[in-house]
């Protein structure tokens, strides 16, 4: 039973469209993260948040933006999708350092045509 | 971003055999080492979080060791079963609490 939900699971969209990838968690975790993974490559951190109204860019530069208005919700938005944005996007949350591992969502596989 | 090396990239194991693989990471600025199992079409699942040099953790037939001084961790699978087929991700956590992931070791257990 998932405690962190991502929608949609798969998305194929045309170039120039605005898209929002949804991520919600029911565990009350303050810390949430977005990772991007290209096929056969490592997960790279693109955004993170340590609480409401707190967002930071990750280690990999991304044209996407995020918001954290509610603890449980951490959506990612691309204002104008491009083929270079084709990738898998994974959302995760954690209680914090020393509290165990991250809980991951199922991911969104995005294809921009 | 930490440079994380996992080897081998993939391996095939006969059911019932044991196997192990490695994660190497920079020993400086170290806070913890995470291991995740990622089965196809599922979410990555946390296996272990280790912090101390010499730590050993066990979960069923899977165990892991940690050497923070030389910057490596081993993950062992004893008596491999088909359900152990997955990609195993290693992720060192630095003092700023961010994780850096390796590309993973993909294990395929043949019946």
Image (cartoon, helix red, strand yellow):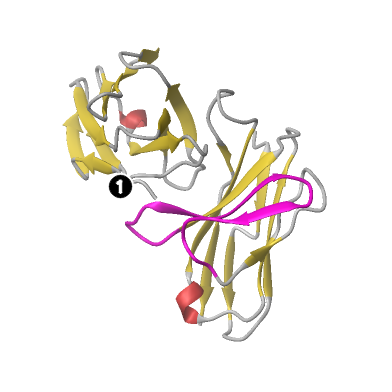
Drawn side of residue B15 relative to residue A10, left or right: left
**Residue reaching furthest right?**
A70
Residue span colored magenta: A37-62
Drawn side of residue B104 relative to residue A72, left or right: left
Residue A99 vertical placement versus A16 (above, below): above
Q: Is residue B35 visible?
A: no
Q: Is residue A3 magenta?
A: no
Q: Position of residue A82 (x, y in %)?
A: 53, 81
Nearest the eye: A93 or A47: A47
**Residue reaching furthest bottom?**
A16
Which residue is rendered at x = 65% and y = 66% of the image? A65
Q: Quadrant of residue B28?
A: top left
Which residue is rendered at x = 64% and y = 37% of the image? A2
Number of other residues with Cα within 10 Å of mark 1, as a class: few under 14, some 14 to 19, many 20 or more: few
Residue designated by label 1? B3
Which residue is rendered at x = 57% and y = 29% of the image? A97
Q: Is residue A57 magenta?
A: yes
Q: Position of residue B10 (x, y in %)?
A: 21, 43
Return the chain for callout 1: B
Image quarter where the C terminus of chain B lies is top left
Which residue is rendered at x = 39% and y = 38% of the image? B91
Nearest the eye: A41 or A31: A31
Secondary structure found at label 1: loop
């Amino acid at each position: 039973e998932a405690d962190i939900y991502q929608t949609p699971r798969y998305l194929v969209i045309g170039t120039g469209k605005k898209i929002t990838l949804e991520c919600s968690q029911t565990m009350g975790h303050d810390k949430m993260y977005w990772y991007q993974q290209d096929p056969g490559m490592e997960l790279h951190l693109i955004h993170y948040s340590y609480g409401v109204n707190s967002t930071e860019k990750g280690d990999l530069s991304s044209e996407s933006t995020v918001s954290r208005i509610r603890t449980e919700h951490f959506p990612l938005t691309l204002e104008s999708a491009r083929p270079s944005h084709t990738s898998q996007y994974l959302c995760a949350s954690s209680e914090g350092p020393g509290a165990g591992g991250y809980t991951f969502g199922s991911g969104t596989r995005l294809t921009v045509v | 971003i930490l440079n994380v090396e996992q080897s081998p990239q993939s391996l095939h194991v006969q059911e019932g055999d044991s196997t192990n693989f490695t994660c190497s990471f920079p020993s400086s600025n170290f806070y913890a080492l995470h291991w995740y199992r990622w089965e196809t079409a599922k979410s990555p699942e946390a296996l272990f979080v280790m912090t101390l040099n010499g730590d050993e953790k066990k979960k069923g037939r899977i165990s892991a060791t940690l050497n923070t001084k030389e910057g490596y961790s081993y993950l062992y699978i004893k008596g491999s079963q088909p359900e152990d087929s997955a990609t195993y991700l290693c992720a060192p956590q630095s003092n700023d609490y961010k994780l850096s992931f390796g590309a993973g070791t993909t294990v395929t257990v043949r019946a």
